[in-house]
Amino acid sequence: MSEILIVYSTVDGHTKKICERLRKTLEHDDNQVSTVSLEQAIQMDLEPFDKLVLGASIRYGKYRPAVLHFIEQNLELLNRKASAFFSVNVVARKTEKNRPETNPYFKKLFKQTDWKPAKADVFAGRIDYPNYTFLDRQMIRLIMKLTHGPTDTAASFEFTDWDRVEHFGKAIDRLQTD
């Protein structure tokens, strides 16, 4: 049994939804799992946790600035403890860009930091046109048109492979703690 903290950075809530699925997967193995927003985690003492997981989404090609700040603020701890990271982005809907070694956003983030998570993955996210602002709806539709994605602004499209999310959760469960 482990004390696990799952931290999420989300714009539209989908990364939080993935974190909740991870929490359920990990709780089935008698772990004590907490899920908190990045804003909450910045204020917390992370030392008591055996395992730390960070999930972050991409919007317009970037993670929120607080993601890198959190990693830098906790770098020593993240490298010392059993830690994991996952990225959520719509470009990962493409098979050739859905792995840490092939996803451009993942690769860019880890060029900026010395964090070496024990486990890492990339999950395709969701496009939820009806819930976007007018400007976001138009911008994302343009991006999707350019990248051959869905452009029907009256619909939502979920690309997340939930079996893969659960597999990632089981891999986190198997991480050894110090």
Image: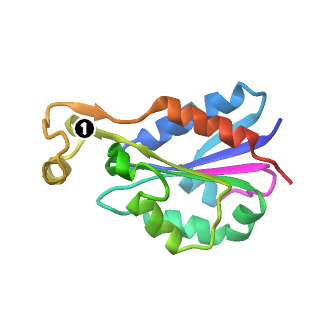
Up-down relation of residue 147 to residue 110 (above or below): above
- Give me the residue at 41% from left, 39% from top: 14
Q: Which residue is drawn at 41% across and 48% down?
A: 98
The x, y position of residue 76, in whole percent, is 73, 70
Chief secondary structure of the magenta portion: loop
Using the image, determine if residue 71 lies above or below residue 85: below
| Region in magenta | 43-54
Q: In which quarter of the image is residue 47?
A: bottom right
Q: Quadrant of residue 43?
A: bottom right
Q: Residue at x 51, y 29 (%)?
A: 163
Identify the residue at horizontal 17%, vertical 46% (top origin).
Answer: 148
Name the image quarter holding the C terminus: bottom right
Q: Is residue 57 left or right of residue 134?
A: right
- Between residues 22 and 91, which one lies in front from this camera angle? 91
Q: Which amino acid does label 1 sit on?
A: Asn
- Residue linked to disc 1: 131
> What is the count of numbered marks?
1
Q: In this view, does 142 lie above or below 110?
A: above
Task: Report x, y in % for residue 16.
Answer: 49, 40
Relative to the observer, which residue lies in front, 81 or 33? Answer: 81
Q: Does the magenta stretch include residue 15?
A: no
Please check the rendered image and state whether residue 49 is part of the magenta-colored stretch, yes or no: yes
Drawn side of residue 142 relative to residue 65, left or right: left
Is residue 63 visible in the rendered structure shown here? no
Q: Is residue 142 above or below residue 105?
A: above
Q: 135 or 85, which is in the foreground?
A: 85
Residue 46 visible in the picture: yes
